[in-house]
Amino acid sequence: MCKAVRARMRRLVCRARRDAGMVTSEYAMGIVAAVAFAVVLYKVVTSGQVSEELQAIVERALDARM
């Protein structure tokens, strides 16, 4: 590689190292988003229609002949 390419790569690596990782506020927002998604998923899975469908799938799987 030529010197200019190596120097540019070195600058990019240094810049990436300075900006690596999240700050506390980003972690907090990520946790809030994950909890919100978990709540929505829980509500969907425990709703009547979805619960009945999941139960029917499990019952069919257990009644299957091998």
Image (spheres, rainbow, N blue to C red):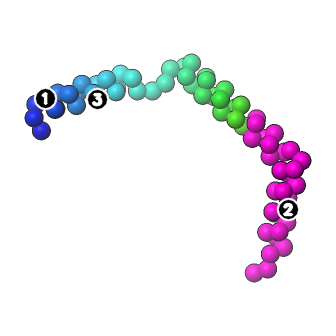
For mark 3, does the 10 Å Cα neighbourhood hold few (<14), some (14 to 19), or many (20 or more) residues?
few
Magenta residues (range): 39-66
Residue 39 image position (x, y, % from top left): 76, 35
Q: Residue furthest bottom?
A: 66
Among the two numbered marks 1 and 2 on one chain, the one whose residue lies closer to the N terminus: 1
Kindly identify the amino acid type of the residue bearing the numbered disc 2. Ala
Which secondary structure lies at badge 2?
helix
Q: Residue furthest left?
A: 2
Q: Residue 11 lies in magenta, yes or no? A: no
Tell me the distance, in whole angstroms, between the alpha carbons under discs 1 and 3.
14 Å
* Number of numbered labels in the structure image: 3
Kindly identify the amino acid type of the residue bearing the numbered disc 1. Ala
For mark 1, does the 10 Å Cα neighbourhood hold few (<14), some (14 to 19), or many (20 or more) residues?
few
Residue 18 image position (x, y, % from top left): 35, 22
Which secondary structure lies at badge 1?
helix
Left or right: residue 64 compared with residue 34: right
Q: Residue furthest front?
A: 49
Residue at image position (88%, 55%) is: 52
User: Where's the N terminus, which quadrant?
Assistant: top left
Residue 42 image position (x, y, % from top left): 78, 41
Q: Do residues under tags 1 and 3 come within 8 Å of each other at their CB atoms?
A: no
Among the two numbered marks 3 and 2 on one chain, the one whose residue lies closer to the N terminus: 3
Q: Which residue is mark 2?
A: 56
Q: Which residue is mark 3?
A: 13
Residue 3 image position (x, y, % from top left): 10, 31
Tell me the distance, in whole angstroms, between the alpha carbons under discs 3 and 2.
54 Å
